[in-house]
Each structure stands twice: as structure tokens, then as C-alpha cells.
Image: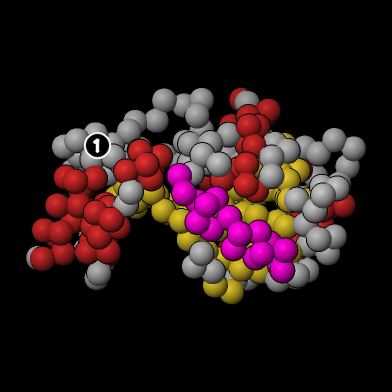
Amino acid sequence: MGMRRGEGVGFFGRGPEAGAVLAERRRLVAEAWEEYVLVPEGGSVGVGEALGLMRGWTGLGLAGVREAAEEVETDWMVLERDGCGEFRVRAGAVCFASGWSLREKAGQTVAEVHGPVPGLEEGLGKSIAVFLDRLGPGSVWCRDNWGLSADPGRDHHPRRAVARLEAGAVLDGAWLRLEEQLFAGLGSGGVLFAIRVTSHRLDEVARVGGAAAGLAEALRTMTEPVAEYKGVAAAREGLAGLLERAAAG
């Protein structure tokens, strides 16, 4: 799973593009509130705790879910246990998801959320469940996820026609889409899950020591179902070759 100890202040702090990010969040929330924001019915102890953590980490007032949706740069969700002890998506504000919709995930278990990802539940489902079960109050962990895209924009919601990478894609027309993820344990037993998305043009990434070779290997060894899910099936052979040439100098 690639977990590492994390801390909330740095994760939720203002980034170099804060103005543009927050302006886009406010626009999306105004345009399609129901697609990007999930408010719990009947209140939620876990949501109140998550808002408290975010207030402490950001220094913002954040009176409720709407304020956190518009004033916090990162996407975030609250997972709470149901009567059977399963974690379910209870609330959140997700404006920059990579090809999925918060509205579709509402009320789902973690296994159901991961269902569309080929092999994830079978390979890591038990490890994920154990990790979440053991995530104590105040504990913060982070991990990274990545994908490739022909679109450097932040909003990859299914309602948008996001360009896919095709055969013949070149490094200066593809972007590495990084997701830094945070998991924070809540006092009530729930979990605050947050995502910070950044995009980096692939030819620039390839100049970073070891990055080109590592990405090329990841593309070469990726299973076909995962490549299809990530939207790189048509382009991965060509991009892997370009990255290998970049790595060779």
C-alpha cells in the first residue's frame, strides 16, 4: 500500500496555485453541487470531527460542509462505520476526482468504492480493511497514487469529456497526474480521507533522475485491465519507449 506517516498541516496547507484551485472549486460547487458535495442526512459525529481537524490544520472557520467544500484546497471524504462495522462514504467534497463521481460513491462500502479498479479489492482489500480498522484517533498516514492523462486539468469528473491518451501520444502532450492521499483517524471510529491532485507534463518529469525509467517499467508491467482502467492502454507502449529513450539519455 506504500503508507508513510503524515501530518495534516502540510497536507492541507495553501499550495502555490491556491487562488486558482479555490476559484475552480467554488465554480464547480455553484454549477453542480450535487455532483461534487455530499452532506450527511440527519447530522454526523464523524463529519463534525473531520471539520474540527480541518479547522485546526488550515486555520479556517469552516462552519460546515459547504464552507469546507469551497475553502479547503484538497478533496475530502468522511468514512463512518455502519451497523455491521463496515466503513461507508458518509460525506465529503470531491471536485477533482480522477474519473469518478462522489454522488455515485455515496453510501458505498470501501470494497464497493474500489470495485471498478481491476485487482485492487482481490489483492489489497484485506490489507486496506485491516489498516482502516487499526487507524486510531489522531493517527495520520499518507500514500501516493498516480495516473497518466492527455488533459492537465484538475476536474476529471465523468460529466466532463476528458481527452484520453491515444496511440502516438508524446511526452510533451501527456501529464503525470499525482494524487497524494491522507488518512486520519477520528475519535468516533471513522476516517477522514483526503486527496491533493497535481499534474506534471511528462517530458519535464522525465528529466528528474530515475523517473523516466521507473515510469517506463510501470507501464511495461501493468496488466491490460489496469491499463484500460487508467486510460493508457492505447498509448502505453509508445510512451514506455519514449521514456526509456529519455532515461538512456
Query: Compared to 55, does 163 lie above or below?
Result: above
Observer-nearest of 138 and 216: 216
Residue 62 image point, x, y percent: 77, 50
Task: Classify mark 1: helix, strand or loop.
Answer: loop
Residue 234 image point, x, y percent: 24, 36
Residue at the front extreme, as displayed: 122
Image-based side of 53 in relation to 177, left or right: right
Which secondary structure dominates the residues rendered in magenta? helix
Q: Amino acid at mark 1?
A: Ala
Q: Quadrant of residue 38?
A: top right
Image-based side of 246 in relation to 22, left or right: left
Query: Residue sitting at 72 percent across and 69 percent down?
Result: 134
Residues drawn in magenta: 118-135
The answer to whether residue 226 shows anywhere in this view is yes
Q: Which residue is mark 1?
A: 234
Question: In what quadrant of the picture does the C terminus appear?
Answer: bottom left
Observer-nearest of 83 and 48: 83
Query: Compared to 86, does 165 lie above or below?
Result: above
Query: Residue sitting at 11 percent across and 58 percent down?
Result: 245
Q: Is residue 170 magenta?
A: no
Image-based side of 19 in relation to 77, left or right: left
Residue at the bottom extreme, as displayed: 5
Observer-nearest of 88 and 23: 88
Residue 11 image point, x, y percent: 58, 63
Residue at the right extreme, as displayed: 42
Query: Residue sitting at 10 percent across and 66 percent down?
Result: 248
* Circle 1 residues within 10 Å: few <14, some 14–19, many ≥20: some
